[in-house]
Image (cartoon, rainbow, N blue to C red):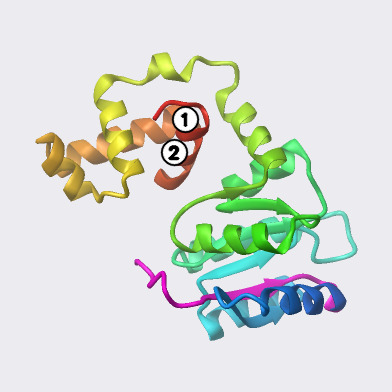
Amino acid sequence: MTRDDDRPVKTVLVDDHALLREGLRSLLDRDTAVVVVGEANSFDSALAEIANSRPDVVVVDLKLTAGADYEGLRLIEEVTKRHPEVASLVLTTFLDDDLVVRAVRAGARGYVVKDVDTTELVRAVRAVATGGSAFDPRSATIVLRTVSGGRDVAAELTDREREVLRQLAEGKSNAEIGGTLYISESTVKFHIRNLIRKLGVSKRTDAVYVASKRGLI
């Protein structure tokens, strides 16, 4: 589903601290590109709010309880499953290799820490709302280091996979890629599956992001 880039990004804030949610809402409300349509402080209330307000993006803190669990990860996974049209963006104080990778695998399209400035946060919200990815420099480094695993990914990609990757970077659909490269849509899907596997990501948008960061396109 493609959203209208001209309208504000409908956003739900999920954080167990009311003061932090209030401050975040105040910051985002200053920018006309984003409109906060709801807030939640727990896993259950977040799912209910998302179902009710149908946002474009949910901004999630990883810690939603005082315990040791990172319940935000479970929330992202559930949102991805129930509402695949809603993009999840992590906004947290925790920057850890394992957490970043787990968040991405759960379905998060971006990961930024809470010392990010308002301009960058709005940019991140808009990026994930339009199907892109948004990682601050530190989390991006973690993602790239993890997915590469020391392998020479560039050498693993075939010429055809590189062609498909370039077409994906231009935002083309499977049908459009097939028409441009004179191959069937099923063959395009086959190449995209291979790209996702080789780049160590879960979505085509992340494949483009990781490939661009590694200079593959």
Instruction: Give percent across and percent down for residue 94.
Output: 81, 49
Residue at point 66%, 57% (across, down) = 120
Residue 65 horizontal/vertical position (percent): 84, 66
Evaluate if marks 2 and 1 touch, with contact meaning CB atoms under 8 Å apart.
Answer: yes
Residue 177 part of the magenta segment: no
Q: Type of residue at label 2?
A: Ala
Residue at 68% of width from left, 34% of height from top?
Answer: 142
Q: Dot 1, how many residues are within 10 Å of its Cα: few (below 14), some (14-19), or many (20+)?
A: many
Q: Is 134 placed above or below 207 here?
A: below
The magenta span reads 1-18
Q: Residue 207 carries which label?
A: 2
Dot 1: what SS? helix
The dot on residue 199 is: 1
Of labels 2 and 1, earlier in sequence is 1
Q: Residue at x 80, y 60 (%)?
A: 63
Looking at the rendered image, the quarter that the C terminus falls into is top left
Label 2: how many residues lie within 10 Å, few (<14), some (14-19) or many (20+)?
A: many
Give percent across and percent down for residue 177. Answer: 20, 43
> For this rendering, which residue is in front, 201 or 21?
21
Left or right of 51? Residue 27 is right
Is residue 17 rendered magenta in the image? yes
The N terminus, quarter of image:
bottom left
For image coordinates 48% across by 40% down, the residue present is 209
Question: How far apart are the two marked residues, 2 and 1, measured between alpha carbons?
Answer: 6 Å
Vertically, is 76 above or below 204? below
Extreme residue in the right direction: 66
Residue 12 place in picture, x, y as percent? 63, 75
Q: Give the amino acid at mark 1.
A: Leu
Picture layout, residue 203 above or below residue 194: below
